[in-house]
Image (cartoon, helix red, strand yellow):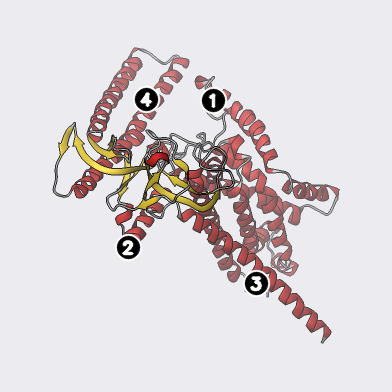
Amino acid sequence: MTAMRQNSRWRWLTAGAVTVCLLAFTLLIALLAWQGAHAFWPQPVDLYTFTQHEGHESRLLGETIEHQKHFPAPAGEQGNSADQVNRYLIKTGNRDWDAPDFRVVYSRDPANVSRPKDILLLQRRSHGNAYGWLAGLREDNEVLVAQNTDALLHQRLAQTHALVRQINHIRRIDMARLNNQLEMLKEQAGRQRQAKQFDLQTQSEYQANQAALQRRFEKLSATLASLQHESQRDVLILRDVQGNDHAIPLSQIIDVWKPNALNLKEKVLHFLQQIWHFVSDSPADGESETGAFPAIFGTVLMVLLMSVVVMPLGVIAAVWLHEYAGRNALTRLVRIAVVNLAGVPSIVYGVFGLGFFVWGVGGTIDQLFYSNALPNPTFGTPGLLWAALTLALLTLPVVIVATEEGLSRIPDSLRQGSLALGATQAETLWKIVLPMAIPAMLTGLILAVARAAGETAPLMLVGVVKMVPELPADAVFPYLHLDRKFMHLGFQIYDLAFQSPNIEADRPLVFATALLLVLIILSLNLLAMGLRHRLRERYRLMTQ
């Protein structure tokens, strides 16, 4: 009876600990989602009128971030330091002609606040949001007139977006392929010169091929220039709160809406559209300043490459330790080394990856295979490959320990029965032991992915950057470019939180990016857990 009561206490204690963990994770997700939603939910735009000394009035237009009614008057502001004033934190936007984005205003009397329905908000590719009123549309300095100006604006904006997509396609794919063909042609000619095979006929063929590619490149350049000129023809005239007009090309506008005129359904649709822009746009293509697609792509691709490297190495090491190595001093030394490697700070792995992989291995590869490109490094510089190898080394102890633990749970009777039936040790290992240990291997993979996807410090030394002109994978042969640098969600969170010149504007994006990283890690883990559960059920009967 006493033992049953003690077991009941332990069960309640375990259930309580699990509940606390689940509650903490749920609160974390809720906090990130609530704070990150402010970056995408359409906020109303307020028109402030402040009455200053001697009856003068000043006006501000923007989103209200914070309003404190009873705020101690700071020194040098209105009244004495003991007075109470109103403090307003307003996001005014219009960074390129009326910086800064955020204004702090102190007022003894409450401001007169209104929300005109015709206020326009422009989401731009650079310089942040712009607030004002639509003063007109122009095409090549000619005023466009229409009965429904808003419909005309959205029609012209859709046409401009189609032109921008066409421009990006030509620049990123068509011209990139031609550049790659020109580079390959030059490398082939260089190899022929070294081999003394560059005779008159070969030289003539080289010049003809080069001239043909150059003509195609010039034709694409002319098409690109024409499209760029056409995309710059339509201009929106925005009138700010001071009555000044500003010409903004439609090619610089991502979206435009009237926030004070939206109903609930339109707000929800706009919210979902802004989330799609965030996860699909790329700053390198000029889509927006805060697009997260390159960081998402870089994070997932790096984790996949790391998994491809770490799983075979970890499984082979675990099989050797458990199945072949005897219980001797060498085996104990290896196990101690594996456990100690799991506790090494991640930045140390970054330093090792920079010294060994980047400068050592990469520099040697450049000297052997890319000597023509030196002193410009090809693989002797931080890149995707070295980042994946560094994180594979970092997570290797986790995979080894988890796999060896799974191997130890397989009954020896299965091994002995297989050997008794005439199978060799290798056949027993391949057909009996390893299939039953796959769930444990996937457990190690889950732990490795969870740690690798969230690492930032070592990546700053071996390949991650703030902005990349091209993704590590594209439509140009060999399609996967392991020597390129890449973006990472963890580094983007660090950059938005600590290195951004406009921290107030980027604060909601920090939470949104953190939530995105958590969801990606959770999705990868759930995929591995589902596969693990399926394989565990398949081999459950063999262990009974």
Q: Which residue is mark 4?
A: 182
Residue type at the position of mark 2: Lys
Residue 434, given in percent of the width and then of the height, sits at 64, 60
Does dot 1 land on a helix, a strand or a loop? loop
Comparing labels 3 and 1, the label whose residue is closer to the camera: 1
Which one is in front, 145 or 424?
Answer: 145
Q: Earlier in the sequence, mark 4 or mark 1?
A: 4
Comparing labels 3 and 4, the label whose residue is closer to the camera: 4
Mark 1 and mark 2 residues within 8 Å of each other at the beta carbon: no
C-alpha span from label 3 to label 4: 59 Å
Q: Earlier in the sequence, mark 3 or mark 4?
A: 4
Q: Which residue is mark 1?
A: 377
Q: Is residue 39 left or right of residue 540?
A: left
Residue 435, given in percent of the width and then of the height, sits at 62, 62
- Residue 411 in sight in this render: yes
Q: Which residue is mark 2?
A: 265
- Residue 292 in sight in this render: no
Comparing labels 4 and 2, the label whose residue is closer to the camera: 2
C-alpha span from label 4 to label 1: 19 Å
Residue 485, given in percent of the width and then of the height, sits at 51, 35
Mark 3 and mark 2 residues within 8 Å of each other at the beta carbon: no
Residue type at the position of mark 1: Pro
Residue 533, given in percent of the width and then of the height, sits at 58, 67
Residue type at the position of mark 4: Leu
Find the residue positioned furthest to the front: 54
